Amino acid sequence: MTKFSDLKLSPKVLKAVEETGYDTPTPIQAGAIPPALEGRDVLGIAQTGTGKTAAFTLPMISMLARGRARARMPRSLVLCPTRELAAQVAENFDTYAKNVKLTKALLIGGVSFKEQDQLIDRGVDVLIATPGRLLDHFERGKLLLTGVQIMVVDEADRMLDMGFIPDIERIFGLVPFTRQTFFFSATMAPEIERITNTFLSNPARIEVARQATTSETITQGAVMFKASRRDRASTEKRKLLRAIIDSEGEACTNAIIFCNRKTDVDIVAKSLKKYGYNAEPIHGDLDQSKRMEVLQGFRDGTIRFLCASDVAARGLDIPNVSHVLNYDVPGHAEDYVHRIGRTGRAGREGKAIMICEPRDEKNYDAVERLIEQQIPVLENPVTPTSRSAKPITETHAPEQTEKKSTNRSSSARSRKPAPKPEAAAPVTPEAKPESKPEAKPTSQSSPSQSSSSRSSSSRSRSSRSSGGGKQVVGMGDHMPGFIAQSFEERRGD
């Protein structure tokens, strides 16, 4: 079995690794570190939670230990799709480079430009940034990329999803052609393949698992949900989420709850707190300081439930996450792999449960096709009777209930309130003509009297056939009955 001591890392880096308690590298680390130390480009593909971050930070520290950075000219560049992932990479450098004199700077949004400019002006060996903030500094003339020796693109497919590919291509044009490049991701979309073929030179491809596979330590399941009524869907879905949490009991020590929309993240977190659950939201619209505060609280255990958008789905290493709950089926199948990869990390056991509505069937099938396995369907902890305990007919008039009865389930049609429309039959529009069968003789002798008591269609026919010489002018037979009546009255005056 390979050990870190067999990977030819510098002694100072090995010492830092040993102090963290690690002895055996993961497959992606054992495969990527040797070619990286040889100066080759590396294309690493592995499922989440397998240690991809250390696979590029350890060789980078060993190679950058010699040399000195110049002002505004970083020696290496690490690009990350989100602020949280960039901050996590920075923490890894702090952990593994504590015995080496290397300087670093973190360029992310939500932080003052002035503080970042001061770090760049002193010169940094490692520059960790999101693409947008990096280009902001470059366009302001505060940064030169001509001294970059090593360039890393972490979570490359997430860059594609977030629309960063044009920025990535531009940044590649700003760094030297002779750089060494590392690409790491859990999935590899065709567009990413094109980028790697363009900007990587004969890379060592390290694929330790089939693309888009999920960890065997994660127990997966799905709960099917169908609302009793459309306007109750959101309320009942949040109730189902609470029931799932309760059904897991003490096994659910903490959980990340993923929603597709930022608005739902806030709503779900607020609902959980209302019912006594310790929950906080995290998404891209929050201030960076608030996002880091919430993330740190979840890591420390002061926050039990983290309601998140996909900003927390990629690359975040949060240890001991017992559950991942997908409140929504992700729109992109690859996101499912990244989401559930927040649990079951480093060989630990984890559980992932997804709520699926009828409208999610297409996305649900796409997920199963991607991971090439069926997701077991779990029993719904909220029984149908408890979800629809309140009769639907209580909030509708009898006529409305009769119209909608064809769209309901058989159980709804068999409820006792359903016969109400039959009891009210004498007042339905169809009964009115039958209640006055003797109105015709009266109309022949007295046209004005019959027109005031009949329906608008009868009045129209009377005015055309037995109007006593009164002829309709203009519209003729196509004129609506109510207009004909008004016309007769005006002529009578």
Image: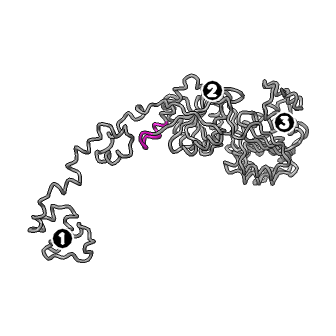
Q: Residue at x 19, y 55 (%)?
A: 432
Splitting the image into 4 quarters, where does residue 378 fall?
Answer: top right
Secondary structure mostly seen in magenta is helix
Q: Is residue 405 above or below residue 14?
A: below
Mark 1 lies on residue: 463
Residue 451, picture quadrant:
bottom left
Left or right, 165 with respect to 419, comes to right
Q: Closer to the camera, 142 or 26?
A: 26
The reply, left or right, for residue 12 in relation to residue 312 is right
Residue 183 image point, x, y percent: 78, 44
Q: Secondary structure at mark 3?
A: helix
Q: Is residue 480 above or below residue 102?
A: below
Frontmost of labels 3 and 1 is 1
Circle on res. 166: none
Q: Amino acid at mark 1?
A: Ser
Measured in 3D between alpha carbons, the distance from the residue under mark 3 to the one under mark 2, in whole angstroms, is 33 Å
> Which of the image's four quarters has the C terminus?
bottom left
Q: CA distance from mark 3 to mark 1?
A: 97 Å
Q: Which residues are magenta?
A: 227-237
Q: Residue 29: x and y, percent?
A: 80, 34
| Secondary structure beneath label 1 | helix
Identify residue for label 2.
Answer: 301
Q: Is residue 223 magenta?
A: no
Locate the N terminus and report the quarter of the image it occupies. top right
